[in-house]
């Protein structure tokens, strides 16, 4: 009889382990943001046990490409109007106060020490109405961001003459990794993030200086500073429980997140749809559906994107032969890697590395 009891206990222990490893996130957690975001409470991501690990994973995979930097100066009674762009904007108010509005949404107040985040794909404007409260058409300056992937200059956009009422240091970037894209793609209006201390101002000024001054390692330095800035911004948003950071959909699905973490941390592994679904403890169809809902693309398409972004990073930052990069990012064939890289970046891997080397000089 005792042997049957031992077998029963062992089976029970195994069942509990499987349940723990493959636990399902309750639907109420996923939909609670829509219901209770204004109240926050227990549904805010930072109060969920898995949030810290999920955010750390977001930090690990975070990649962004800076495309423009500028200084913005607005005089009383004037407006700077920016056309829609695929770039995300990070703007730090260094002087004065004013207002921001995105695509006709109600304006939000700006003050010294706040970070303004403008979403991609939407026109936006900053302004200082002054005493009159109304800005005439002839006191609106329209701005279009440069299309270059990395301009070797810092622009200065000025609206009005005389003493300024508001000044900002501005950076624009394109989110490259899927999780970061998901974070900012969810924005439909401007996010205004209060930021304590001088660290953000110092980072923005240093990025602007590096961006404007050509020199060895400039591109790598700007990217590293941008990553530090984004991590600082997200940490502050979590600490102050700002609801805009609660919109990374992948953080709501622990099973999909588990597979995504495996894709990022073991990018060289021979992942397949079946192996990733196994990691998530889901069927292939259920995993594909939930992965697409969380990250906006199929698992294999996102994996390919992650691998190519990693390959581009290796080619930029290290003098590695292309064949070594091929294996480091999980490709079995140099020819299939070259085809995929050429389709994504418009040139052969060797030509890409040579171009980056020339720009650095």
Image: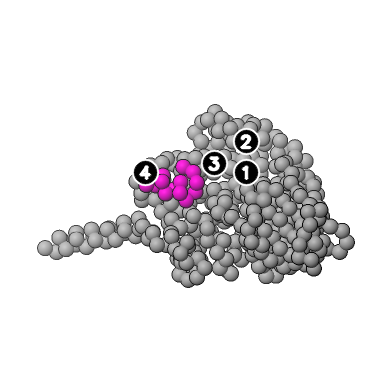
Q: Which residue is mark 3?
A: 305
Q: Residue furthest top?
A: 335
Task: Measure how far apart labels 2 and 1 are at the Cα level.
Answer: 12 Å
**Dot placed on the residue nearer the N-terminal end, 3 or 4:** 4
Q: Position of residue 199 (x, y in %)?
A: 70, 65
Of the two numbered discs 3 and 1 in the rendering, the one whose residue sits closer to the viewer: 3
| Residue for badge 4 | 285
| C-beta proximity under 8 Å, tags 2 and 4 | no
Whether the magenta-drawn stretch holds residue 288 is answered as yes
Residue plotted at (69% across, 51% down) = 172
Q: Quadrant of the N terminus?
A: bottom left
Residue positioned 47% across, 67% down in the render: 36
Q: Which mark is residue 313?
A: 1
Q: Nearer the viewer, mark 1 or mark 4?
A: 4
**Secondary structure beneath disc 1?**
helix
- Find the magenta span and give its range: 285-298
Q: In whole angstroms, how far apart are the C-alphas of marks 3 and 2?
A: 11 Å
Quadrant position of residue 360: top right
At x 34%, y 60%, the residue is: 20
Q: CA distance from mark 1 to mark 4?
A: 32 Å
For label 3, the crowd category at 10 Å Cα-Cα, with few meaning under 14, some 14 to 19 and many 20 or more, is some
Q: Quadrant of residue 237?
A: bottom right
Q: Counting residues from the N terminus, which is met first, the one under dot 3 or under dot 1?
A: 3
> Is residue 199 something one can see in this rendering?
no
Q: Earlier in the sequence, mark 3 or mark 2?
A: 3
Residue at 48%, 57% in the rendered image: 251
- Front-most of residues 270 and 280: 280
Question: Of label 2 and label 4, which has the lower sequence position?
Answer: 4
Label 3 with label 2: CB-CB less than 8 Å:
no
Q: Nearer the viewer, mark 2 or mark 4?
A: 4
At mark 4, the secondary structure is helix
- Circle 2 residues within 10 Å: few <14, some 14–19, many ≥20: few
């Amino acid at each position: 009889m005792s042997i049957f009891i031992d077998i029963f206990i062992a089976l029970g222990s195994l069942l509990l382990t499987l349940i723990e490893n493959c636990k399902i996130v309750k639907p109420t957690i996923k939909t609670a943001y829509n219901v209770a975001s204004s109240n926050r409470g227990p549904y805010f991501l930072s109060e969920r046990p898995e949030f810290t690990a999920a955010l750390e994973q977001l930090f690990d995979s975070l990649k962004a490409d800076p495309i423009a930097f500028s200084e913005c100066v607005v005089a009383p009674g004037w407006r700077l109007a920016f056309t829609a762009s695929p770039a995300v904007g990070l703007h730090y108010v260094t002087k004065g106060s004013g207002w921001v509005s995105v695509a006709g949404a109600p304006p939000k107040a700006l003050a010294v020490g706040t970070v303004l985040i403008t979403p991609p794909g939407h026109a936006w404007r900053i302004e200082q109405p002054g005493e009159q409260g109304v800005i005439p058409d002839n006191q609106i300056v329209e701005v279009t961001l440069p299309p270059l992937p990395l301009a070797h200059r810092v622009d200065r956009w000025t609206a009005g003459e005389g003493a300024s009422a508001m000044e900002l240091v501005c950076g624009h970037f394109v989110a490259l990794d899927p999780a970061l894209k998901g974070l900012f793609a969810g924005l439909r209006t401007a996010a205004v993030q209060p930021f304590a201390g001088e660290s953000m101002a110092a980072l923005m000024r240093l990025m602007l200086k590096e961006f404007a001054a050509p020199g060895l390692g400039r591109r790598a330095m700007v990217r590293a500073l941008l990553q530090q800035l984004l991590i600082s911004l997200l940490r502050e948003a979590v600490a102050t429980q700002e609801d805009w950071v609660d919109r990374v959909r992948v953080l709501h699905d622990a099973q999909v997140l588990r597979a995504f973490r495996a894709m990022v941390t073991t990018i060289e592994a021979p992942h397949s749809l079946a192996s990733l679904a196994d990691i998530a403890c889901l069927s292939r169809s259920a995993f594909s559906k939930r992965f697409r809902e969380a990250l906006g693309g199929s698992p294999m398409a996102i994996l390919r994107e992650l691998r190519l972004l990693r390959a581009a990073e290796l080619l930029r930052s290290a003098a590695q032969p292309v064949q070594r990069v091929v294996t480091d990012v999980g490709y079995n064939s140099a020819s299939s890697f070259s085809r995929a890289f050429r389709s994504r970046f418009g040139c052969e891997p060797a030509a890409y590395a040579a171009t980056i080397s020339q720009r650095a000089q």
